[in-house]
Image (cartoon, grey):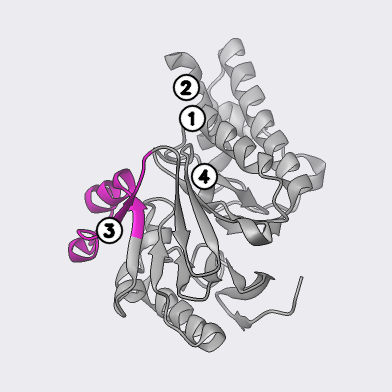
């Protein structure tokens, strides 16, 4: 990977392609940006992936865009509604960038996030709930794929000409995923679809970047969680007990968690889905 474009206590902005940069945040330390995201530049525009966790982080990303491309971000895309990806909407849009998100994400930000900037969501350009939308940045096409699984509505950002995928929180790498709003079977299906793109670089929503082999390992982790849930359901034990007994694969022993109960949360989400079906 190329030398970082910027290094701060809250994370590292690093090039992952031609005029494509990934922001890899350090959320367990400094929460200025909090989530991962990035910048994608074309001849006519600059797309910022995510509004990040707060206005200071979003403004810093805009500063980086100006330094790297000599332009403000012209567009911002939200991958989903969670506040660690949308809390910086004011900072992200105060220079006039267009906002792209699904209607579900827009509505969830308004209904579920505290102090959501209503005036910045009313003119959002709506990404279709199914299928995809293509943004033309000038000499560069960026695909916005509507999926779902981490939440009711998730968008992945695909830079086809450089083999880069920003997976939002559909993809975690180096950190165990948060299943708080997950539809587990949809999540696994979405991750498999992203893996099927056979991209060169996958930018996770939290953690690091990975490649196709890393995505295979991530899919295996999701499969292990499902297996643990089905086993717990069959044996009549609780998600709490199953979570306490869950162990990461040896190759992932250095992965971290936002919350020590994330294993329980993931297994519980699967158990609810299994019971409902």
* Disc on the earlier residue, 3 or 2: 3
Q: In which quarter of the image is the N terminus?
A: bottom right
Q: Identify the residue at the far front of this view.
A: 139
* Disc on the earlier residue, 1 or 3: 3
Give the image location of residue 169, x and y in percent: 52, 49
CA–CA distance between discs 1 and 4? 10 Å
Give the labeled residue for mark 2.
273
Q: Is disc 4 surrounded by few (<14), some (14 to 19) or many (20+) residues within 10 Å?
A: many
Give the labeled residue for mark 1.
269
Give the labeled residue for mark 4.
178
Q: Is mark 2 on a helix, strand or loop?
A: helix
Indicate which label's residue lies in the foreground, 3 or 2. Answer: 3
CA–CA distance between discs 2 and 1? 6 Å
Q: Which mark is residue 124?
A: 3
CA–CA distance between discs 2 and 4? 16 Å
- In this picture, is 112 found above or below 236? below
Residue that appears at 62% across and 81% down: 7
Horizontal side, residue 122 vs residue 201: left or right: left
* Disc on the earlier residue, 1 or 4: 4
Range of magenta residues: 100-129
Q: Is residue 226 magenta?
A: no
Q: Identify the residue at the far right of this view.
A: 250
Residue that appears at 75% across and 41% down: 217
Q: Decide if residue 49 is in sight here.
A: yes
Q: Report if the CB atoms under discs 1 and 3 are less than 8 Å apart.
A: no
């Amino acid at each position: 990977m190329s030398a970082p474009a910027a290094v701060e206590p809250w994370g590292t902005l690093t090039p992952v392609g031609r005029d494509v940069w990934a922001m890899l945040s350090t959320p367990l330390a400094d929460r200025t940006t909090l989530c991962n995201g990035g910048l994608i530049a074309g001849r006519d525009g600059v797309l910022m992936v995510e509004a990040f966790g707060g206005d200071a982080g979003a403004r810093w990303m805009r500063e980086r865009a100006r330094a790297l491309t000599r332009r403000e971000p012209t567009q911002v895309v939200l991958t989903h509604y969670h506040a660690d990806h949308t809390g910086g909407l004011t900072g992200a849009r105060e220079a006039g960038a267009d906002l792209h998100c699904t209607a579900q994400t827009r509505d969830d930000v308004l209904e579920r996030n505290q102090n959501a900037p209503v005036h910045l969501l009313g003119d959002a350009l709506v990404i279709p709930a199914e299928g995809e939308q293509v943004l033309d940045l000038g000499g560069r096409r960026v695909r916005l794929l509507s999926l779902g699984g981490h939440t009711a509505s998730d968008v992945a950002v695909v830079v086809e000409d450089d083999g880069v995928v920003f997976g939002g929180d559909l993809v975690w790498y180096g950190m165990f995923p948060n299943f708080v709003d997950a539809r587990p079977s949809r999540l696994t299906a979405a991750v498999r679809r992203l893996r099927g793109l056979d991209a060169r670089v996958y930018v996770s929503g939290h953690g690091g970047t990975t490649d196709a082999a890393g995505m295979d390992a991530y899919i295996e982790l999701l499969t292990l969680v499902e297996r643990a849930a089905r086993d717990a359901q069959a044996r009549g034990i609780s998600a709490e007990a199953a979570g306490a007994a869950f162990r990461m694969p040896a190759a992932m022993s250095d992965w971290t968690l936002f919350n020590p109960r994330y294993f329980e949360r993931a297994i519980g989400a699967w158990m609810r889905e299994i019971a409902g079906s």
